[in-house]
Amino acid sequence: MTTWACGYLYDPALSDHYERCVAAILQHSLRPPEMIVGAVDARKFRSSLKIFKATSAPGPHRQRIRQALDAFYGGQECEATLKFLMLQIVVALIRRRVKVGFIPLGCIYFQGPVFSGLQH
């Protein structure tokens, strides 16, 4: 999923499309997102903000995503998406035979070379 998101963000046309969608929704920031796009799409929107924030480089795009998270969700990222992304990372690392351990609060620590060879 994160590979797909990176590809989406680094394609100029697709990145511009997502940026325009976020900007359009932000124009209605005084209303709940459920009233703007509906309940199901509001959940998808929040999830997409987490995914694209996690995969975007620092800069205006990430600032726009932060602005949307602040405006609609009190700055809180989607916990379910965060857990899913963490699971995807763990699965990818296990496939590469990296020793993975857990510490309290769900934080992940790694033993050995972790990110060498991992793609963005």
Image (cartoon, grey):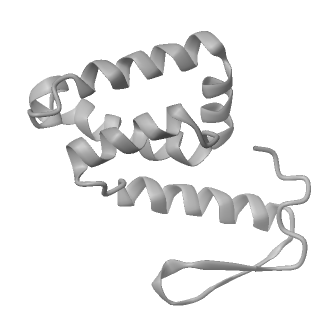
The C terminus lies in quadrant: top right
Q: Nearer the viewer, residue 114 or 57?
A: 57
Task: Measuring from the top left, give residue 68's x and y in whole percent.
Answer: 31, 38
Taking the image as shown, residue 42 lies to the left or right of residue 34, namely: right
Residue appearing at x 51%, y 44% in the figure: 53
76 is higher (above) or lower (below) than 97: above
Taking the image as shown, residue 100 lies to the left or right of residue 32, namely: right
The N terminus lies in quadrant: top right
50 is higher (above) or lower (below) than 31: below
Taking the image as shown, residue 89 lies to the left or right of residue 99, namely: left
Question: Residue 1: in sight, yes or no?
Answer: no
Task: Measuring from the top left, give residue 91's x and y in whole percent.
Answer: 69, 62
Residue appearing at x 27%, y 41% in the figure: 43
Residue 59 falls in image quadrant = top right
Residue appearing at x 56%, y 78% in the figure: 107
Question: Residue 33: in sight, yes or no?
Answer: yes
Residue 88 falls in image quadrant = bottom right
Residue appearing at x 26%, y 30% in the figure: 41
Q: How many marks?
A: 0
Task: Measuring from the top left, give residue 97's x and y in whole percent.
Answer: 86, 70
Instruction: In the displayed orientation, state which residue is furthest to the bottom.
Output: 104
Task: Measuring from the top left, give residue 100's x and y in whole percent.
Answer: 73, 78
Q: Nearer the viewer, residue 96 or 37?
A: 37
